[in-house]
Image (cartoon, rainbow, N blue to C red):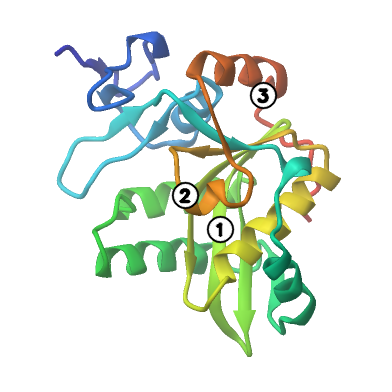
Amino acid sequence: MFLHQLNPVKADFPPVSEALEQPNGLLAFAGTLNTPTLLTAYQQGIFPWFNEGEPILWWSPDPRMIIRPESLHISRSMKKELRRHNYQITIDQNFSGVMHQCRVLREHAEGTWITNQMEAAYNQLHREGYAHSVEITDDGELVGGIYGLAMDRMFFGESMFSKKTNASKLAIIYLCRFLAEQGIKILDCQVPNPHLESLGAIRIPRHLFMKYLKRYCRSTESVANWN
């Protein structure tokens, strides 16, 4: 097994075709989580995913899971929930809170890849206008949300959480509606997930995902108005 070691100064990612089959998509290690490196990675179909105490690991799995925002599937029961819920839904009002809750809930369950390094890096991306969140609050309490990166006409979903029934689904639905209105074509969900498949997420081969990147992620600036 050969893994490419990244230069700590320059993000010299190898072609994603060199990613391992097992574990699926592991491509490189080391490097940094600064903004230029992360933006370069996402534009090349690569994302960081590692546990506390490990070196930074970079992945590009095959297949890839995506949602086309305009094709989101909403079940009949979920449509009823959308009509009757009393939650408050906002964008970019509590990015750090959403990311931290994603971390805390996973730490209590199966463990988390949202390390101190990751929290610091993605909060910096948010301050620079690249990372965004959807928040679901109930009487002032943050009960659900999702966060990720927006570049050109793509959104790269990173993680979501739910402390009340359907709160994370509401966040995804609201996000997809917003993305569709703003001309975003692809929501990257990274790896297969039954929860997302119920909302219309599909698996596509990595080579097709790379074609979407060339078409819809030519710039690091999002076409969406997040203000």
Q: Is residue 180 above or below residue 85?
A: above
Residue 57 at x, y = what percent?
27, 32
Residue 185 vs residue 117: left or right?
Answer: right
The three-letter code of the residue at mark 2 reads Pro
Spatial CA span between label 2 and label 1: 17 Å
The tag earlier along the polypeptide, 2 or 3, is: 2
Label 1 element class: strand
Element marked by disc 2: helix
User: Which quadrant of the figure has residue 105?
Assistant: bottom left
Instruction: Select label 2 or label 3 by which is in front.
Output: 2
Q: Circle 1: is it few (<14), some (14-19), or many (20+) Cα within 10 Å?
A: many
Q: Nearer the viewer, residue 50 or 129?
A: 50
State the residue lying farthest toward the front.
76
Query: Which of the numbered marks, if any, corresponds to residue 89?
Result: none
Task: Residue under label 3, please give it.
Answer: 217
Number of other residues with Cα within 10 Å of mark 3, as a class: few under 14, some 14 to 19, many 20 or more: many
Residue in the picture at 40% in, 19% down? 11
Q: Which mark is residue 146?
A: 1
Instruction: Tell me the tag on residue 194.
Output: 2
Residue 70 rendering spot, x and y as whole percentages: 78, 42
Q: Residues within 10 Å of mark 2 (few under 14, many from 20)?
A: few
Query: 137 above or below 96?
Result: below
Question: Residue 6 falls in which quadrant of the image?
Answer: top left
Amino acid type, label 1: Ile
